Image (cartoon, rainbow, N blue to C red):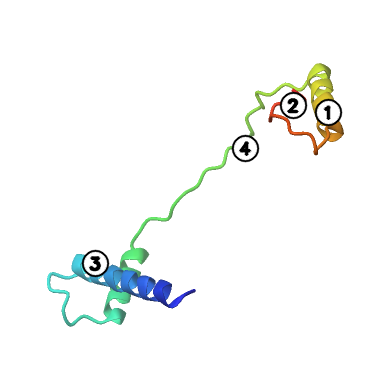
Amino acid sequence: MTTSDEKFYAQRDANFKERVCNILFDNPKGHSEEEVLEIINNLAKGLEPVVVTIPEEIAPSKVIITDEYADKVDTLVARMGTSDDSEETHDSEGC
């Protein structure tokens, strides 16, 4: 990290601390970081736990792979492998 990056992030961090103090206190002057952290920890303890529900079944895929599809993919890959890289072509070669 360059010195200018360090200064940017240090200033950004200072601005963040100031905004947090302004939110927590009517008069943010004279409050320590420890006091801020204690308030935040107490607020976090009072929050309800977050419940994450994961479905037991995975939705079926909407992609149906048939022999015809597989053959087309094989043909495309084969054409890509046999193209001459020294010859200038457009991106859709082999399609």
Amino acid identity at mark 3: Arg
Amino acid identity at mark 2: Glu
Residue with the mark numbered 3: 19
CA neighbours of label 4 inside 10 A, class few (<14), some (14 to 19), many (20+): few
Residue at image x 83%, y 34%?
84
Residue with the mark numbered 1: 79
Q: Quadrant of residue 22?
A: bottom left
Relative vertical location of residue 12 with respect to residue 74 in this rendering, above or below? below
> Which mark, by number, is residue 56?
4
Marks 1, 4: nearer the viewer: 1
Out of 95 and 52, give the one closest to the viewer.
95
Out of 89 and 73, give the one closest to the viewer.
89
Dot placed on the residue nearer the N-terminal end, 2 or 1 = 1
Residue with the mark numbered 2: 93
* Residue 80 location (% of width, % of height): 81, 32
Under circle 3, the secondary element is helix
Q: Is residue 75 left or right of residue 37?
A: right
Dot placed on the residue nearer the N-terminal end, 1 or 4 = 4
Out of 89 and 28, give the one closest to the viewer.
89
Amino acid identity at mark 1: Arg
